[in-house]
Amino acid sequence: MSDASARSGNPAARIEEAYERIWRTRMADVPILNAKLRVEAVGFRAWQGQWLGVLVTPWSINIVLVPGEGAWTTLAAGAERFVAFPAGTFRFIAAHEASIGESHSCSLFSPVLEFTDHEAARLTAEAALVGLFDAAHAPAADHLLREHQPEPVAAAVSKRDFLSGKFSGTTHGDRG
């Protein structure tokens, strides 16, 4: 499949095939699998020139972005990007799978042991997609994101300012 044709069609079937293979091979003996769940690509749709949906697997539920016909931010595997939605800004981690190509995922649940059946996992995935586009969720989502961001680094103080007692625009003698 050419890169162009892969970008133009809905990737849900390709994603399901790839993750079925991963489940049966690399994840086969992993103890965190929920045997009540299966692989399903939920609600994939074109969004801002990319494909967006939620991937349910027996080990996780993730929001997933894959290239579409629009601009795409290419990243090394494991690199992250932040994507803005009406509900807030979310962190996505890049991955590369031969049969899918590059994808970016935002973890919703991992592991997924609390789900009693696949229907509950699918309904959760569908609700997550609805919630992603509901601006009423923005303050909570942005608050969670800020909690996981590193603190801003203070401006460097030159040796000259340090030795003369100047910190943050003041000197020790400026106590007024």
Image (cartoon, rainbow, N blue to C red):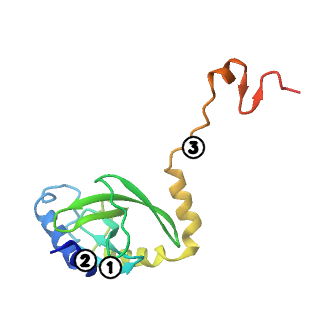
Direction from residue 163 to residue 1 in the image, left or right: left
Relative to residue 78, is residue 174 depicted above or below?
above
Instruction: Please state which amino acid type lies under the numbered disc 1.
Output: Phe
Q: Given the current orientation, which residue lies at the most extreme right position? A: 176
**On-image quarter of the N terminus:** bottom left
In this rendering, the label closer to the viewer, 1 or 2: 2
Report x, y in % for residue 72. Answer: 36, 67
User: 10 Å neighbourhood of mark 1: few (<14), some, or many (≥20)?
Assistant: many
Instruction: Please state which amino acid type lies under the numbered disc 3.
Output: Pro
Q: Which residue is mark 3?
A: 152
Secondary structure of residue under mark 2: loop
Q: Which image quarter: residue 171?
A: top right
Q: Nearer the viewer, residue 101 or 25?
A: 101
Q: Residue at x 46, y 62 (%)?
A: 90
Q: Which residue is mark 1?
A: 44
Q: Nearer the viewer, residue 55 or 79?
A: 79
Q: Which image quarter: residue 162?
A: top right
Q: Nearer the viewer, residue 125 or 47?
A: 47
Which of pointers 2 and 3 lies earlier in the amino acid sequence? Answer: 2
Report x, y in % for residue 164. Answer: 72, 19
Report x, y in % for residue 172. Answer: 78, 22
Instruction: Please state which amino acid type lies under the numbered disc 2.
Output: Pro
Q: Residue at x 32, y 58 (%)?
A: 94
Q: CA distance from mark 3 to mark 1?
A: 36 Å
Q: Nearer the viewer, residue 84 or 111?
A: 84
- Disc marking residue 139: none
Q: CA distance from mark 2 to mark 3?
A: 38 Å
Query: Is label 1 in contact with label 2 (beta carbons under 8 Å)?
Result: yes
Report x, y in % for residue 126. Answer: 38, 79
Q: Which residue is mark 2?
A: 11
